[in-house]
Amino acid sequence: MTPAFVITGFLGSGKTTLIVTAAKKHLKDKKVAIIVNEFGEVGVDGKILSMSYSKVVELSEGCVCCTLHGEFEKTLSEIRTNYNPDILVVETSGAAEPFPVMISLQNLDCTIEGIICLIDAKHFDEYKNNNIAKHQIGSSNILVLNKIDLIEDTTTLEQELLKIWEENKLKNMFTGESIFERVKIYKTSYGKLPQEVFGGLFVIDKKLYGLAENIHTHSHLNQRVLYFEKPINIEDINDIVKDSIRAKGILKIEGSDFPYLVNYAFGYLDISPIENHDENKFFLVLIGENQ
Ligand SMILES: Nc1nc2c(ncn2[C@@H]2O[C@H](COP(=O)(O)OP(=O)(O)O)[C@@H](O)[C@H]2O)c(=O)[nH]1
Ligand SMILES: [Mg+2]
């Protein structure tokens, strides 16, 4: 049995950041394999995650909870045969439900050590009515209220979260029994979590069958990839991304010699230099409703 964590949470809530922090801080003595399927991915998260000294496998574009089901199981088997990890971490797409991934993990003899849902404390109001976001919360037994550096008070947010969790939590469709004994909320920034999360405290020991009614059909957001041949003016980036919910990519910026990682979520633009980018490919993935 391979221990596995599932990391879910809406677009830009901080999943990749949490995994890098956890791999460096709490899992550094272990052989960690990470599977990432960010919707609209063209290798941005894979690049960041590979800085965590783990084995990183990217699933090609598509939604892991719908079209990539078979590919996920195949990838997982291959990783175990070829790499034999001590621990597996799966970052699901910000626009996907984590539930089908959980079933696949159990089918392939993994122990689910916890389902972690990241919540963007600053922007939760803007996406809290989104059905996928609600199901992501209800499918998790660890809720991480992230980005608390950007807000003042979390009391109302915590109450709201618990209510959404209660209304959407996973239940056995035959017995109506809840799959989770409890849920825990951690408040943090940049995905920093205490060691206890990685110490077996949140293992799911129930078998996740008979849960078909929990699988929802959902519409997918649109995505677009822009490729850039020339360095771009830093002032222009905001204009390009502003109509998206989420954007990320790697760009060359006028006047600078090295590439930059561009991360945009809910109006916040984050640009930082990136090391070890040997490819000569510069692009932005835009994800949103009207792409
Ligand atoms: N201010 C702030 N920014 C954060 C925090 N966590 C992540 N971010 C930023 O939010 C953006 C999206 O993070 P990422 O981990 O890529 O989100 P993902 O799409 O859920 O994987 C990046 O620019 C991060 O640096 C946090 O706690 N506070
Ligand atoms: Mg990510």
Image (cartoon, grey):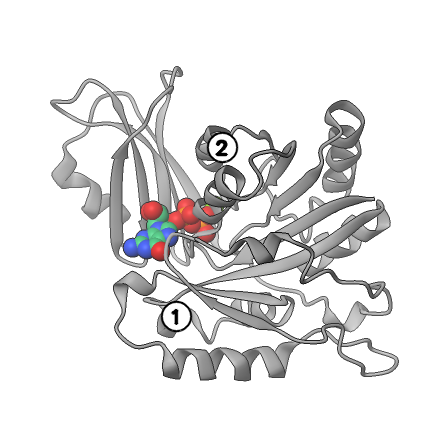
Q: Is residue 136 left or right of residue 21?
A: right
Residue ID for mark 1: 124
Give the percent coordinates (x, y) of residue 148. 33, 65
In percent of the image, x 73 and y 38: which residue is there? 71
Q: Quadrant of residue 284?
A: top left
Does the numbered disc 2 mark a residue whose Cβ is under 8 Å from ligand 1? no
Give the answer, above or below, for where 227 lies relative to 99.
Answer: above
Report if residue 102 is visible in the image: yes
In percent of the image, x 21 and y 41: which residue is there? 237
How would you rate the neighbour count of disc 2 (Cα within 10 Å): few for under 14, some for 14-19, many for 20 or more? many
Q: Mark 1 is on which residue type?
A: Phe
Residue ID for mark 2: 52
Label 2 SS = helix
Is the Cβ of the residue at disc 2 closer than 8 Å to that at disc 1? no
Give the percent coordinates (x, y) of residue 76. 75, 37
Give the answer, above or below, for where 85 lies relative to 223.
Answer: above
Report if residue 291 is visible in the image: no
Q: Is residue 43 left or right of residue 229?
A: right
Does the numbered disc 1 mark a residue whose Cβ is under 8 Å from ligand 1? no
